[in-house]
Image (tube, coloured by chain):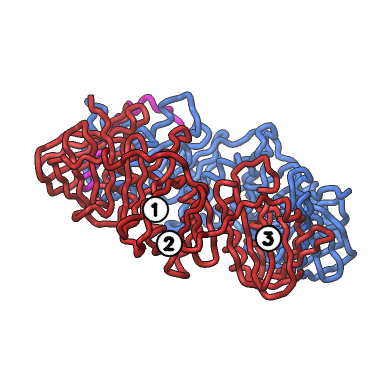
Chain colours: A red, B blue
Amino acid sequence: MKLYCQKSYLTNALNNVSHALPARTTNKILEGILVEVKDNEMTFTSTDTNITVKTRIGIDGNGEADFVVPAKKFISIASKLPEEEVILEFDNEKSSLSIKSGKSCSHLITFPADEYPKVMVQSSENPISLNKESFRKMIRKTAFSASSDEMNGVLTGVLLEIKNKMIKMIAVDTFRLAVYEDPAETDENVSVIIPAKLLTESSKVIPDEGDDQLHLSITDNKVVMDFDNNRVVINTLNGNFINYEKIIRRDGTIKVRVKKEDLLASIDRASLMATVQTNNLIKWTIKEDTLEMNSLSEEGIIDESVEIIKEGEDLNIGFNYKYIMEILKVIDDEEIILHMKDSLSPCLITPLQGEKYLYLVLPVRLN
Amino acid sequence: MKLYCQKSYLTNALNNVSHALPARTTNKILEGILVEVKDNEMTFTSTDTNITVKTRIGIDGNGEADFVVPAKKFISIASKLPEEEVILEFDNEKSSLSIKSGKSCSHLITFPADEYPKVMVQSSENPISLNKESFRKMIRKTAFSASSDEMNGVLTGVLLEIKNKMIKMIAVDTFRLAVYEDPAETDENVSVIIPAKLLTESSKVIPDEGDDQLHLSITDNKVVMDFDNNRVVINTLNGNFINYEKIIRRDGTIKVRVKKEDLLASIDRASLMATVQTNNLIKWTIKEDTLEMNSLSEEGIIDESVEIIKEGEDLNIGFNYKYIMEILKVIDDEEIILHMKDSLSPCLITPLQGEKYLYLVLPVRLN
């Protein structure tokens, strides 16, 4: 088998499959990438058995072949090829893939394709079509709020709900919650829990350009995403998600309207004096049209002041700055509303109007 | 004491002194920066006792003060100040420095200045004036070749030689050597060994802009560099430097003229298959007008080919790619000459003409 392809397509495809390579594995073959050549297409597959990425590129050449090639070496060689035109040649007898470009020629050992696990599944016949850009955005807005502690079971996942022509992602950890929703042009109903880490990896495969649509299928404990020349398959989490609507109490009478960038910049500075010993505590004193903020350590104090428009009582409340910061960093709006009740009740963060997104953070008890 | 200064000057000064902060120390006071205010100037000093950096900025305000302030916090607070105008206020009774900018106000605890060690020395009355840019360049071209093994004594240093209106820096490790020379407009003679790591740190303080000159003094086991608003003092190394001229044998009859970028790019690719087990070996086969290069591991082979103009015999020779790469990365010339004798003798690297720079690398013995 001998074929010609473009370096930029090759490196892009390898970058995509790199997101499913196992960080550590005792199964040697999973350190490789499965390569299949057929009908002027070259398909690359990698998996850590929980997430699988398959991506294909067009090639010039004929013949069929399939083999497994060491992933790390293939990726680093491809990224450094001197010219855009690449010639790949597979020698079945010698179990060798040669990669030629300009005056550079590499030979990589290969392994038989039939040693690679059969992990890929078919998508359903009637997948749900979703807006690709919206889907990727929702992952960025919610997945960070899921638990990173494997002991927390379903809370390490993002709940994906599609119903009433709306798509919603929800992530909940011990001290916070994130909900984001967008319209979806489908009559289907879906409720599935996808591991947050793997969902985030999949979002890195979703390109800016290309098709508008992403096609989603749910089949026996797997979610299948098809977009452009890629397929991503993730094992879903079994179990019942927490009844998150019950956690969200909308009884706060204090509403603070604030410029997101001002609040973020002040927290960023105040965070310099926050310490792990105090649970990363920053204190807020909300009074009239000002949110005073301060943090304290053995080495000093930082005082910040942010302009606000307030409804309701004054309030003293404390937060672990990391939780608030992570939320503010994924919000694109210029202004937001903080909804609070008292110094022990959760703070809700929403847009000025409606609840396209809703974040909840538990405060830190003040002494 | 209350004074006004510019954020950009303050952060620049703090960045300069950061290069002399100890990485680890049991002497708590050295984790601070000594700040002295007098005559519309503010001076910052830090030291790890082997290198001292002192830098000053102009300020607006009056009064005198001196105190020590926690370095890490001061540096990170300054870098995040919201506005260019900064107000610093020192309260001696409260041992507190306040840093105000816009709506942000930080208070840092301070320590008495007299707890800070007296490390700064005077420069000599007749320092040697050198071209600042040339001095910084020479450090980049040589210091990387010094030994990083503290057991190697003077070889962890760079030999600075000034004589016959020439300035020279020389660094030698077990497997390599670097020499770089420039004209110097001075009649002085100098021969001093400066720790390579600290010399490299000092070069990071030397700015692109500002004065053309750097003033060098050697006083009792210290080298003092004055430039712009900075003074850097480094403890020199005692001992006799190796007789490096003796190591450099100019009896190679094989001369290879090559484009530096071509050679570097090929080594960069070939390095992907080089392994620690083989001492990072890449093999060169020099034949007629081609330098063939290859590297080998369990996972495959990389073959590279570089155009050359050769004088002398053909040759097979092997190198630890890291040594060659580090040299090529600091050479700015488009073309260079490799001088070789046989597969066991060192390779010399020089410009097309003369020996403004000379690098030497020992080959790896081929099996």
Using the numbered discs, state the Cα–Cα distance from disc 1 to disc 2 in whole angstroms.
10 Å
Callouts 3 and 1 on one subunit: yes
- Residue occupying the point 12% across, 41% down: A253
* Amino acid at pointer 2: Ile
Regarding residue A319, the answer to whether it shows in the image is: yes
Pointer 3 chain: A
First in sequence: mark 3 vs mark 1? 3
* Count of labels in the image: 3
Q: Position of residue B99 (x, y in %)?
A: 26, 40
Give the camera-side residue of B153 and A28. A28
Q: Which residues, given as a range, are shown in magenta?
A: B98-119
Give the camera-side residue of A159 and A85. A159
Left or right position of A120 against B240: left
Secondary structure at badge 3 equals: strand
* Amino acid at pointer 1: Val
Q: Which quarter of the rendering shows the N terminus of chain B? A: top left
Pointer 1 chain: A
* Amino acid at pointer 3: Val
What mark, if any, has residue A190 been given in the picture?
Answer: 1
- Residue occupying the point 50% across, 34% down: B23
Q: Position of residue B286 (x, y in %)?
A: 84, 63
Q: Position of residue B87 (x, y in %)?
A: 23, 44
Using the numbered discs, state the Cα–Cα distance from disc 3 to disc 1 in whole angstroms.
33 Å
- Residue occupying the point 46% across, 59% down: A216
Q: Which residue is mark 3?
A: A35
* Above or below for A43 versus A139: below
Secondary structure at badge 2 equals: strand
Corner quadrant of residue B243:
top right
Q: Which residue is mark 2?
A: A128
Q: Residues within 10 Å of mark 2 (few under 14, many from 20)?
A: many
Secondary structure at badge 1 equals: strand
